[in-house]
Image: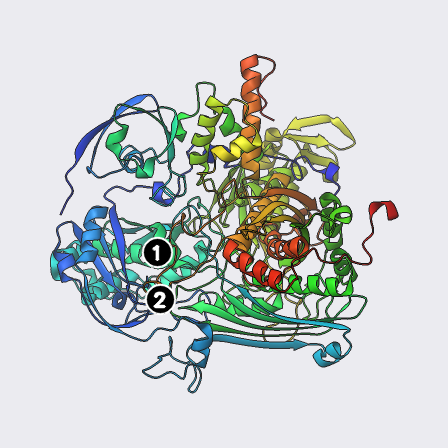
Amino acid sequence: MSTSLEIVRLTVNGDLRTAGVPPHWTLLETLRYAMGLTGSKQGCDKGDCGACTVLVDGEPTLSCITPVWEAEGHRVTTVEGLAGPDGPHPVQDAFDRYGAGQCGFCTPGVLCSAAALLERTPTPSRREVKEALAGNLCRCTGYTKILDAVVDAGRVLAERTSGSGEASHG
Amino acid sequence: MAEKAQSDFTIVGTRQRKVDGLAKAMGRARYTDDIALPDMLHGKILRSPHPHARILSIDTSAAEALEGVHAVVTGREMAVPYGVIPWTPDEYPLCVDRVRYIGDGVAAVAAIDEDTANEALRRIRVEYEELPPVFDPFEALESKGGDDAPYLHEPRKPGWNGNITKVVKLEFGDLEEGFRGSDVIVEHDFLFEGTTHAPIEPHCAIGLWEADPPGRHEGVAFSEGSGGPGDTEAILRRSRGMEPKDQSDRGDLDGEGQLPPPAGQLTVWSSTQVPHYLHRELSRVLGLDPARVRVIQPPVGGAFGGKSEPFDLEFCVGLLAMKAGRPVKILYTREEVFYSHRGRHPFHMKYRVGATRDGRLTAVDAHTVLDGGAYASFGLVTTYYSGQLLTAPYQMPAYRFDSTRVYTNKPACGPKRGHGSVQPRFAFEVQLDRIAHELRIDPIELRRRNFMGSDTRTVNELRVTSNGFLECLDAVEEASGWRERFRTLPFGRGLGVAGSTYISGTNYPIYPNDMPQSAVQIQIDRSGRVAVFSGASEIGQGTDSMVAYLAAEELGVPLEYVRVMAGDTDFTPVDLGAYSSRVTFMLGNACLEAARKLKAKVREAVADHWECPAGQVLLAGGWALHAPDTGRKMPIREAFVLAESRFGTLGAVGSYNTPKDVHGDYRGGTIGASPAYSFTAHVAEVDVDVETGQVRVDRIWVAHDCGRALNPVLVEGQMEGSAYMGFGEAIMEEQVYKDADHGRAGLHNAPSLLDYRIPTSLDTPELTSLIVESIDPEGPYGAKEAGEGPLHPAIPAIANAIFDAVGVRIDRLPFSPPRVWRALEDARAGGELAKPAAPNDIRTKSEL
């Protein structure tokens, strides 16, 4: 027994990529097992935990319940694609400074949700961060340091855009 | 260890990044399921649909015949009983002749992809003879065995009840006299429902059998259909290497230059928190020389006790890889994680507690039935912990506990964060709150009055050294505005307090031995780089970072000069694992020992160069400095060059073993003994909706005595994560199973992360961490544990806050809306739904 494969073409982190996958595969399976992008995680395989969250055209999307074909023709961004030419995305750096990742397994999904939030709400309140991350389960941190980190990343981004100061890497 | 002031440190005690923080944030950390080996097969495990049944036969031929299937294994091929506790080996990697819960593994396959593996499972025919299951622990206790109600396990002695794992009865002090001298006695029943760990990473393991040609050869032969237990035997016999090889086994090796084929080596990557115990059990169960087994523990995506013993998938990937001659990966589905469980035991508890009228404890009497599920797991220890760990931070003149762990046809329970002591702490701290209320004493004041002090022994003779519990109480009292707000918030809102203690590791390892509990090897060289080889298990708690901070501090290098390699049994020294909050204390001390050996050499070499006493050479912040004149300095790299020139290649090992004379001389007296104890106090603030029964926890203040905070960021993270987890158990989590009226009896009620509700960012209270440092005399730089202790008071603090809010006691977890609503309705009917009376001695700020 073997599963026949079909060719899928995806734009992931700016690259057009091609892979042969079983037709029932999800976006997550394709990213992880066909393209070697293992940053996005599988925690539950049914859209409950949010560890698989990636951005599709900038919107947080549960890649474990997204058939890969639905992502064709769209822009997919994974945790590996959040960093820019200047280094880590401010929210990635803030996670590191605040100890917002412990085991780190929910982290990629949380970061994708947080990056999308910061895109539409550059300086979110704590409450807005809580709401934006309500679909990402974290079992280690009690969310406290995650909220601190995302709020601070907003501050860093604001300073960058206003040019009022250097980004803090303290 | 001399006490050092914070100003003596450059790294320790300051807020630092973690060594693996950015790799995790960038998506670069490679967890077990992120590893793909060439030619790797996909494994799956067939699980029992019955809660209790005999296996009459298993026919795997149709699965083996399926194209793409490379190996099938059943329990008979690994029929060696194991158990993480050597005294209770009562399970097999796959069931041999009996299944004991829905989800028990019976066979495993390895195939070219997941679809083929699933199809192969469907083709395995298992013939079962169903047996009457038992789900209720009290029914299991009353069972007489026999065909109508067969025991889950063979009684260990004739006439014993085969449904009992362990009974522990211990008494300290004079209980009767204690109760006779009591002015108030409270006695109530409590039920702590089981909960599970729910790490976000499901268990995953990969097996690799390297044997070329023998393993490969026979593996291929096996998959071609000549399979069966006999062939597995042959592979194992040829590959074990435990005994000298039979000459006839060597074939024609008489010629010049001929050598016997190399014996195989098994490597298992696993998301485990106990690589060493896994190493031992793989070797024992698969019959392999331990020198031929390697366990690699990649970063683990959460564990909380749920990955602290060997699991079926780890044995299965090993044997499947040996049979197939190709690497095999098994990744649990989320359902399998819920069924594998080993989580918090349901405890049925009765607590009788007495006190004098001024609130001093006189006697504590506890009766507990632990619902253990199908196997022993850590249950022997859990049974002891259910009583042994209650005896601090309060002085108890007399104490008795009587605990019985029972087998039932449900997934086995085991250790979850705060192993065995979270449940009794709930019951006991609620009883303290009742006593305080009856006596109209402020519950914080009542706890202060019973404080045991430091450098003392508990009633069950455990040695307690540093103890910052009073400072913890002071911190939460102050931060929460307790004096102004307790009993004075409007009806529906309340504050509650609770305290606790926990071990910093266990003094005795799981299997008796005199070897170190933890060890570190450090290499330094002319590049300035410090390489730390750590046996310990990084599971998110920050172990790798912790040793890096200590090594950098001692050797005076910047943090980024330190590399940590951990969790590989071939290349790192033995550490017993990430459990019982042992790692900071034990690995930290081991690391300091290794680092100090090297530091002495570096200082000596620099002192020779400067022609000064070695004692005048400081290593700090990337420099070697001359203490009397710190303007005289050299980069640390040059200091290492001097040392390497003088002493040759620089390496050192350090190890730690526990003190062995710090417990009572009675059977079981060693269990609960720890080199140091942490202490915690919580105040929780709740809002109870009296119409719906919904309890909202708005805030938890956590004060924790961690000895010394090596990195406050990580300590706070542990405190917040603990408080969060306790909050979840208090309000929403329960690992429960269906009964026959609600579906298939024994089926998990909610095996998904949607239905088994764990708190989201919106549910979780605001958590405020207040670090207390008591500087332990034996901890590394004075540090103690922070990973488990801070969970304990969350649950009783919330229970006590509910009482402050609405005057209602609920002694059964979780405090979910239906249960709270029912309690509120009962209180309303009895006219008791009201703010409770204030203590007589509560002092407002203006009175102080």
| Mark 1: secondary structure | helix
In terms of secondary structure, where does tag 2 sit? helix
Front one among B591 and A19: A19
Of badges 1 and 2, the one in the foreground is 2
Is B94 placed left or right of B662 in the picture? Answer: left
Q: Quadrant of residue B107?
A: bottom left
Q: Residue furthest bottom?
A: B159
Residue type of the residue flagged with mark 2: Asp
The structure residue drawn at horizontal position 26% and vertical position 63%, both measured from the top left corner, is B236
Q: Which residue in the structure is indicated by mark 1?
A: B314
Pointer 1 chain: B
Most distant residue in the right direction? B847
Residue B58: x, y in percent?
20, 67
Q: Residue at x 46, y 59 (%)?
A: B343
Going by the numbered disc 1, the residue's amino acid type is Glu
Numbered circles on residues, count: 2
B145 left or right of B210 in image:
right
Q: Position of residue B515 (x, y in %)?
A: 54, 61
Q: Tell me if residue B201 can be seen.
A: yes
Say which residue label 2 marks. B741
Give the CA separation, mark 1 to mark 2: 36 Å
Quarter of the figure with residue B311: bottom left
Pick the front one: B181 or B627: B181
Give above or below for B308 relative to B484. Answer: below
| Dots 1, 2 in contact, CB < 8 A | no
> How many other residues sit within 10 Å of disc 1, few (<14), some (14-19) or many (≥20)?
many
Choose the circle earlier in sequence order: 1 or 2: 1
